[in-house]
Image (cartoon, helix red, strand yellow):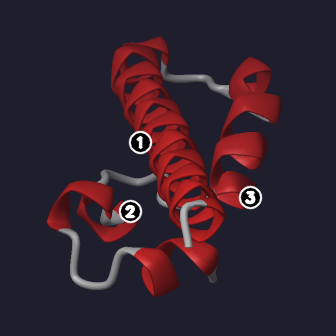
Amino acid sequence: MVLPTLFPNDDELDYKKLGSIQNGGDAMDTFANLYLLKDKSKLDDIKKDLLAYCHLDTLAMFRIWEKLHKIIKESENE
């Protein structure tokens, strides 16, 4: 729960705005089960959802790193 603690109410970092994949468990399960997909027309939608999740997850990790780096810098200057 680091992200909501450091960035409360930040719409840009809201996983609930994503499509069908909104957390790491969903992403892993979806990716692991792609080979079972019978309806290949859904593949593009799943790919978009996976990419959107990965994009947001990477952005979130970067923002957390950025914030912690800023906090450390500020504490060093005190």
Query: Which label belongs to residue 25?
Result: 3
Q: Distance between the residues labelled 2 and 3?
A: 13 Å
Residue kind at label 3, given as amino acid type: Gly
Q: Which of disc 1 and disc 3 is earlier in sequence?
A: 3
10 Å crowding of disc 2: few (<14), some (14-19), many (20+):
some
Question: Residue 69 at x, y = what percent?
Answer: 59, 50
Q: Is mark 2 on a helix, strand or loop?
A: helix
Horizontal side of residue 21 vs 18, given as left or right: right
Q: Which of disc 2 and disc 1 is earlier in sequence?
A: 2
Q: Is mark 1 on a helix, strand or loop?
A: helix
Q: Residue at x 63, y 83 (%)?
A: 1
Query: Which residue is tagged 2?
Result: 15
Query: Which label belongs to residue 56?
Result: 1
Instruction: Pick out the residue farthest to the right.
Output: 32
Question: Residue 49 at x, y = what percent?
Answer: 40, 35
Front residue (pair 10, 36) = 10
Q: Which residue is drawn at 17% across and 66% down?
A: 11
Residue kind at label 1, given as amino acid type: Leu
Front residue (pair 21, 5) = 5
Q: Residue at x 68, y 54 (%)?
A: 24
Q: Which of marks 3 and 1 is in front?
A: 1
Instruction: Pick out the residue farthest to the left.
Output: 11
